[in-house]
Image (spheres, rainbow, N blue to C red):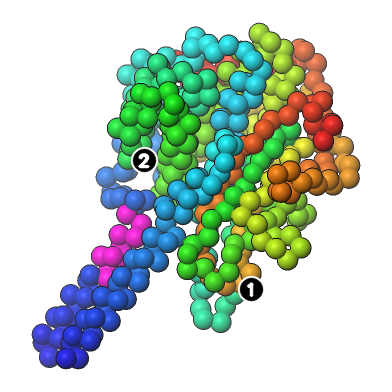
Amino acid sequence: MKRIIFSFLLIFAISGFTSVNAQCGEELLKQALKEMGDGQYIKDFKVDLKKENKDASVGYVRFSIILNSRSHYMFNVVNGSSNTENVILQLKDGDKLLATNFSKGKLYDKCQVIIGKTKVYNLEFSFKGGVEGCASAVLSLVKQYTAEEMAAQ
Amino acid sequence: MLKRISFMLFIAAGLQLLSGCSGCNQNQGSDDLKMPDSLANDAPLQLSEELIGDVVQNISSPVEMAALIKSTGVEFSQRILNNPDRVTDYNTSFKRALNLGVYSADLGYINMFDKSSIVINYLLAVKNMADGIKVGQFFDFTALKRLAQNSSNLDSLMEISVSSMNKMDSYLREQKRSNVSSLIVAGAWIEGLYIASNVVEQTHNRELTDRILEQKDIVDILLIILNNFSSDEKFANLAEKMSALKDAYLNVKITTEVGEPKSMEKDGMLIIVQDEISHIEASPETLQSIINEIKEIRKTIVE
């Protein structure tokens, strides 16, 4: 009897293990691409933050990206279905926050930015309260402006 | 008791197998993916693999350049692109990696102009080069070919091919083959600039001219990376040519105007407008000198 219970628990653990992976894998990216809209896909970012030990805070993951001047970009995010908190995206120029999907206490699944200077920017992903979680984000190009159009923005 | 231990061992092995498989799509048999020739780099590096990977990731996508070219209204020209029949000439990993970048930039340009009639030839060239450096597993050629046969699928084709390139780049970095990814990125970057240069010579389009001139900082980044592998003679030669391009960029002046940060709402979505705008100045002679160097490097890569 014990053995049956043990086997049952084991199967349960294995199925849990594999489904967690599915929630954080390629399916998330497919969903993010589907929700990208009409923009031109540029790059995707995989976020998978895990605690090193029980009491630790997870922190954030940072990517550096070049964004071009006179370009209108959109970031859209999709959260893993087992996340307890949704992902927070922050686009920074050095330490200066340029754009985020977290504004006035509300989290959005998209954020857009019009860039005026070609340079390396930092893209950071974290979860509120430093909890664990996974997400997929897609960077897409919405529009490229002329110098005149840019000046009029 | 023995049965129970055997059962536990069996289970442990099963779990091990599962956890090993969780990254199967990224880490297939690393032993048979070693470079067949000079791109198996053993020389000590000044920059870490991680840092190089981070920097390589920075180089912007050729898709953006292709989109900008299309926006100029210029007609598509196949003559500018590298000939896909040349694949058989590229018989070293060094050449294959560089031209994988070149053909991928060409593919971006072709897709942007919806030229479904030639897209398969370029997909084949990309696949051929990728197989040659043992990263062909990231291109599902059958699926890509199926998409390419219908012009209404070109957006999906573009998405899948860009995504495949991104996965391949991540894989190469994981495998500590950043020398290979830096060549792919350098090839794609030069080809994007080469196509843009040809269009600028025809149209004198300001946006495209500025995009070429804005690459001043990127040349520095690429040069640092290539110099990192300069114990290999082929890398050293390419770095030397890139150094001449860097010199051509010296007279490009980029200034930044800082304004007020702005935000606007469109279709219920908040759009942030950066408070910095760059201004670029360069004489026609400086631009021509940059274009000449780009053409020179491109010639070295494709011939």
Looking at the rendering, the stretch of residues picked out in magenta corresponds to B15-24
- Residue at 51% x, 81% y is A54
- Residue at 12% x, 91% y is B1
Kindly identify which chain the residue marked by label 2 belongs to.
B
Is B17 inside the magenta-drawn segment?
yes
Q: Mark 1 or mark 2: which is in front?
A: 1
Report if the CB atoms under discs 1 and 2 are less than 8 Å apart.
no
Q: Which mark is residue A129?
A: 1
The reply, left or right, for residue B302 in relation to residue A109 is left
Based on the displayed image, in which of its 4 quarters is residue A74 positioned? top right
Kindly identify which chain the residue marked by label 1 belongs to.
A
Do we see residue B52 in this rendering?
Answer: no
Above or below residue B127? Residue A99 is below
Residue lying furthest left in this view?
B3
Quadrant (top left/top right/bottom left/bottom right) for the C terminus of chain B: top left
Give the residue type at disc 1: Gly
Give the residue type at disc 2: Phe
Is B302 inside the magenta-drawn segment?
no
